[in-house]
Amino acid sequence: MSNRNHTHAIQSARRAGRRILVAGTLLWALGCANSPNLPAYPARIARPTSGNVVLVQNSILIADASGSTDRTGDFPQEKAIVQSFVEGMPPGRYRSAMRVLGGREDDQLHLETFDRYELRHRAQKLRWTGRETPLASLLDEYTTTLSGKSGRSAFVIITDGVPTRYGKFIGTKDTYEAARRLSRANEGSVCFHLVRLGDDPRGEALLAKIADLTSCGSVRRLSELDNAEALYRFQQSIYNGAPPPATPRKPRRMTDLDGDGVDDRFDRCAKTPQGAVVDKRGCWVIEDYVFETDRARISSKHIAPLESVATILKANPSLRVRLDGHTDNTGTSDYNASLAQRRAKAVQEFLEADGIPSNRLEVRGFGSSRPIDTNLTSEGRSRNRRVELSVIDW
C-alpha cells in the first residue's frame, strides 16, 4: 500500500472512531434523560398536635443505595422522598441517624442530637452505589448501640428487602434474625417502619415479617408517600403521641432519729425520749384533760400520763426537761400567763413527789402566746391548753 493510501485509511478510521464516540455519548445522555430526576416535594413539618408530644428518643433513617435497587426507577424516587422526610421531621431534642445501605463509612451519619441541616446535607449527597446490602449487620450494630439508652427508637427503613452480596441474593434469614435480636433486646421500645421499593416478592415477605416483630411496626410501598399529606400522616404516626403517664414518685423513706413516729422533716421537737407520748408535731405533751377545768389542780382520775412521764425520766437519769405551760386565749393575758405557770408548777411538784430531782426540772409559763391550733373551735382551744416537755439536756 502506498503512503498516500495508508494515510487515508488512518484518517478514515479516526473519523469512524469519533462517530462511534459521539453516538455512545448521545446514547448515554439519552439514558440519563430517561432516568427520573424527581424533586423533593415541600414537606409539612410533623409537629406534635394539641395534647401530644414527640415520643421518639432515637430516630434511625435507613436508605437503600445498594446494587439490588433499581438505579433508574426506584432510587431517584427514594432519594426525593428521603429529602422530603428530613424536611418533615419534627423539631426536638431527640437523637437521629441516617444510614445508607451500600454506602461507605463517610456516607453514614451515626446517632447524635437531631440536626436538620446535617441530615439535609446527607440526603442531598445520597447516591446509588451498586454495592451489597448489609442490613443484617446494621441492625446488629444497633442492638449494641441502643443498649442502655432510654426511650422509644423508631427505625424507618426504605429498602427492597432483597439482601445481596457481590450481586447475588443471599437469602433473608440473617436479616430477619438480626431484626428479631434488636427487637428482643429493646422489648417494647423499638418500632420498625418499612417502606418497600420494587416488587420482589422475597423482599415483600421479609419486610412484612420484620414489621410484625413490634406492635408499633408498619409497612407500606414507597409510592404511598408520594405527596406531602401522606408523608405528614406517616411521620405523625412515627414520632408523636400522647405523653406517657408520669412515673409514680418513689415514696421517700421516712427518717425518724428519735423514734417517736414523726418524720424528721416535720418533727418540731427532736430528741424526745423513747416512750414519750407526742402530738402530730412530734412534741412531748401533757394534755388539758389532766387538769381540773380552769384550774391548776391535777385530776385524780387522770394521773396516768404523769406517771408515764415519771417512768421515762427515771429510765433516763441524765435527761433534763423544761415544763412549758400553755393556755387558750379565753380570759385575760395576765390570767392565762398565771394559769399556765401554775399548771406547769403542778406537774413539777407531782414529778418531784414521785422521786424526780428538782434540778432536772425547770418551769416556764407562756400563757396563750404559743398556740398550736386555732382558738376558734373547742377542739382547737383544748389542744392549746397543755403542758409541753422540752428537752434541755440529755
Image (cartoon, grey):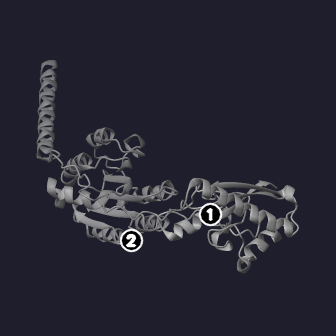
Q: CA distance from mark 1 to mark 2?
A: 41 Å
Residue 38 location in percent, x, y?
Answer: 15, 46
* Nearer-the-camera pick, 345 or 279: 345
- The residue type indicated by label 2 comes to Leu
- Taking 391 as reference, is 286 above or below it? below
Q: Is residue 159 visible?
A: no
Quarter in which the C terminus is drawn? bottom right
Q: Nearer the viewer, mark 1 or mark 2?
A: 1
Q: Amino acid at mark 1?
A: Arg
In-image side of 76 versus 277 (left or right): left
Q: Quadrant of residue 199?
A: bottom left
Q: Residue 213 shows which numbered tag?
A: 2
Q: Position of residue 250 (x, y in %)?
A: 54, 64
Q: Position of residue 387 (x, y in %)?
A: 68, 63
Task: Identify residue for label 1.
Answer: 253
Quadrant for residue 138, please give it.
Answer: bottom left
Q: Which mark is residue 220?
A: none
Residue 22 position in % (x across, y down)? 12, 33
